[in-house]
Amino acid sequence: MQHWARRLEQEIDGVMRIFGGVQHLREIYKDNRNLFEVQENEPQKLVEKVAGDIESLLDRKVQALKRLADAAENFQKAHRWQDNIKEEDIMYYDAKADAELDDPESEDMERGSKASTLRLDFLEDPNFKNKVNYSYTAVQIPTDIYKGSTVILNELNWTEALENVFIENRRQDPTLLWQVFGSATGVTRYYPATPWRAPKKIDLYDVRRRPWYIQGASSPKDMVIIVDVSGSVSGLTLKLMKTSVCEMLDTLSDDDYVNVASFNEKAQPVSCFTHLVQANVRNKKVFKEAVQGMVAKGTTGYKAGFEYAFDQLQNSNITRANCNKMIMMFTDGGEDRVQDVFEKYNWPNRTVRVFTFSVGQHNYDVTPLQWMACANKGYYFEIPSIGAIRINTQEYLDVLGRPMVLAGKEAKQVQWTNVYEDALGLGLVVTGTLPVFNLTQDGPGEKKNQLILGVMGIDVALSDIKRLTPNYTLGANGYVFAIDLNGYVLLHPNLKPQTTNFREPVTLDFLDAELEDENKEEIRRSMIDGNKGHKQIRTLVKSLDERYIDEVMRNYTWVPIRSTNYSLGLVLPPYSTFYLQANLSDQILQVKYFEFLLPSSFESEGHVFIAPREYCKDLNASDNNTEFLKNFIELMEKVTPDSKQCNNFLLHNLILDTGITQQLVERVWRDQDLNTYSLLAVFAATDGGITRVFPNKAAEDWTENPEPFNASFYRRSLDNHGYVFKPPHQDTLLRPLELENDTVGVLVSTAVELSLGGRTLRPAVVGVKLDLEAWAEKFKVLASNRTHQDQPQKCGPSSHCEMDCEVNNEDLLCVLIDDGGFLVLSNQNHQWDQVGRFFSEVDANLMLALYNNSFYTRKESFDYQAACAPQPPGNLGAAPRGVFVPTIADFLNLAWWTSAAAWSLFQQLLCGLIYHGWFQADPAEAEGSPEARESSCVMKQTQYYFGSVNASYNAIIDCGNCSRLFHAQRLTNTNLLFVVAEKPLCSQCEAGRLLQKETHSDGPEQCELVQRPRYRRGPHICFDYNATEDTSDCGRGASFPPSLSVLVSLQLLLLLGLPPRPQPQVHAHASPRL
């Protein structure tokens, strides 16, 4: 077998030496040495320059933010409250007006009034990816807030003056994107004006629940939510509590920590989390699922619930926010004030705020609940029905904002958010936030107001930050990244969420964006701590197509971005320390090389694909490379490579590489007969963006990315020494390769390494495309006991000659498998159409043996950015979930009409119209909704790569009477494993099949992950206490008297209009305590 292996190695090496043209290309570069310079990437200088540029960009936004916040505070202070203000008195552009005009059931259509709404004209603006009007602001008001209320009209009145400040800001900095004021009343005023992107279903946007608003409105929180699950909490009340808890969780960000517990006589966590955990998306998902399993039983024990909560908050052995501490209690009522618990744990300092929520319709005395909140610097809320949930689970933020307002200028610090999806279509953004305070006083000599007016925000698109980073000088495998204090990336080539939900931030940890190891953990910690650093590490990287793993050397360099919570890193392979910069001052030469880009030259010089880069501002982009090349040529006929509107570096390098690859055609490829060696094509790809494929007809079957930096073969060739084989990719769900109809090829590529004056770099990759069928036949001959002239001689078990892969293919299986475990060549004709498949799908028994004998190592990781098809809903009924539909007996009973159940039902139906969680999605709407078509999910990825075994190896697959002998050996200077094995004699010994394809997953076990949380740091500032805080406003509750006529009308509609439910209903009967 070693003899066969040497023959294979020699054949591959011979073909690559003749046709690959590595040595010839080196000579061409040296012959053209006067046409380029070798430049150096100095990591420390590079990363400091980029960090400085980003700091300058963000600082301009900070100045605009401060002007806006100061102006807003002054405008509100000068504003005089008007009790008798009317809608007709206020003129503004209602961003949802156009959508509501099209909706006959909208609030404004019902009122028949549009007098206060401006009608604007809009122009398309590529910077905003939207139609905008720069002369006006737009206003968005949540669906569940009445636009004509006195509070909202006064808010619209004073915020109108912000329009001129927005416009002036843009005049000073034309690069500004959305400027937004999010008011504590729920009003959003943003500039420039654009129509609201209303969803097909009910619009649930409320600025007070946006990640940027929450971060700007209060300091980080340690929160314990305790839920009363005693026997009196049943049916509708319990459902209201479950929904309220889920809504409360949505007000928390990754800077916050939380736990949720239920209590009756005893308290216990609802989930597997036994202590406070970070309120990230995955932990909140665990809580929300666990809350749905709460069951009401037993008696109420406030003492058990509060003692559990205080113990949680006093646990100092865990990571937590260490700022605002609070307990949120949801109950249907009780008489115990548990004063002894507060005296023991919280008095006299009252460092923990207590918020109490009376849930459901009942006649209990709420005085104890009010007292608990008032005695512990909190607030008392009532949630009588579903319509009160959203507003009452977020207004606690106003209380937490008091110390911030009272701190004054000290608290006026700009914070930058995590990455999230812009609701108006900008894509991924970060937002600078600044709180806006109420500077008015209640009267002469009175204490200053302690209410937060809202939060001012200015968006910065990630694409704008990315433009400040070097792209093509770092090479295909070099990149810049940035992380925040949580370790989440805001810049990284692997930050590619497949689907985004504007309600949640995009939180991809640096250690999930790359393959985690101890070195990267240290780098991440140092960056979070705001340190500078440099480290060379050996690490694993995933290939661009996510099929392979390579072990590589990388240099990491990092610095903090001053005045922000971000840190910037630069990653460079050693071979990217230097790069080429073309210097084509000779215009005659420019024209000569440029002519080799013209399609008229392709027949003789080979087809040229050019990377779709931004060579010039006026160059029209296209996904079709032929069309892009046409656009490029047309532009170059109008401008020169030295034009100011063009990127001279990119253009000169592109034209230089066009000439250099043409010389390779002239010196090597054109005079060779590819058919002699069964080659379909030869090719060269360069850092400059050229991919030349010869002959021209081979371009018809060329499927690689025209951008070399995005081509898997290119990036892997740079990272690996020797020849890298890449079989055609096959999905197991697709039909096998059709060899008869299509000529299938296997790519073999290798990097061209130059050494110029002691400086080493790899500016190009060259290769060949093997004809699969012809090389499969050649493979059998090379792995046989004959030369080309010999006649094959069949050997059997009783013969004295050795068996081989050609004549004994009925007894021997001979294959070449690449370093990812994919089949490249086989001596079995029936396996030719399986080339490119993971070998376990071809021969599970043999692949498992190779893995068990350390020829392969497995790496498992999770993709947190995947998109999955939605799960079908379990209930397609048209009625509200869990809503009590009364019987005819109820309907005829006059007492029922005045009962709590009837009133609660009315509120549910009235307010539930704006709350998506209580109504099933309309199937027609869901089908047309992008959110319904796919949702974010976690996928488990498994890759295999060569293990520690380098030598040849014999082993037996022990399977009783069906044992198999196999021999495996790595081929030198390639990524191939040569395997010869006996064919299985029977199928009785089925081994477990190794899986390589991506599978849906719940991700790593969250209950285990929280026991070893990743390092993070909270914001540097905390405002949770101020001695002058007035806590007397702590909630008194309110009720909305029912209208009998409305109830009767609604009930008739309900009985006549709602279809029957197939499952039992949950009745909203009075509590057992009554």
Image (cartoon, rainbow, N blue to C red):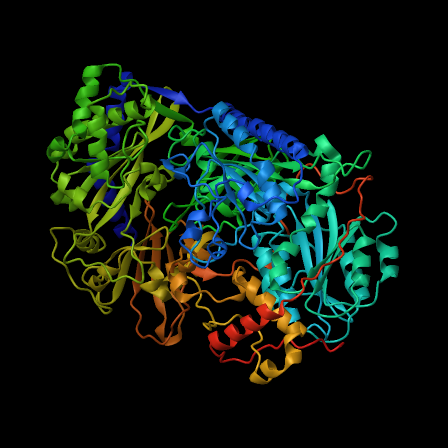
Q: Front-most of 195 and 891?
A: 891
Image spot of residue 650 (x, y percent): 32, 26
Image spot of residue 972 (x, y percent): 33, 44
Left or right: where 642 falls relative to 861: left
Q: Front-most of 443 and 190?
A: 443
Q: Please indicate, yes or no, whether residue 561 appears anywhere in the rendered image.
A: no
Left or right: where 71 falls relative to 169: right
Q: Is residue 118 above or below residue 633?
A: below
Quarter in which the C terminus is drawn: bottom right
Residue reaching furthest to the top: 586
Q: Is residue 1043 above or below residue 625?
A: below
Indicate the quadrant where residue 967 lies: bottom left
Residue at 66% over, 74% down:
898
Left or right: where 136 falls relative to 662: right
Q: Is residue 356 above or below residue 322?
A: below
Quarter in which the N terminus is drawn: bottom left
Left or right: where 115 falls relative to 663: right
Residue at 24% over, 19% down:
640
Q: Please indicate, yes or no, whether residue 650 appears anywhere in the rendered image.
A: yes
Residue reaching furthest to the bottom: 889
Residue at 64% over, 56% down:
248
Q: How many discs mark residues in the rendered view?
A: 0
Q: Is residue 695 above or below residue 937?
A: above
Image spot of residue 679 (x, y percent): 17, 45
Indicate the quadrant where residue 622 lies: top left
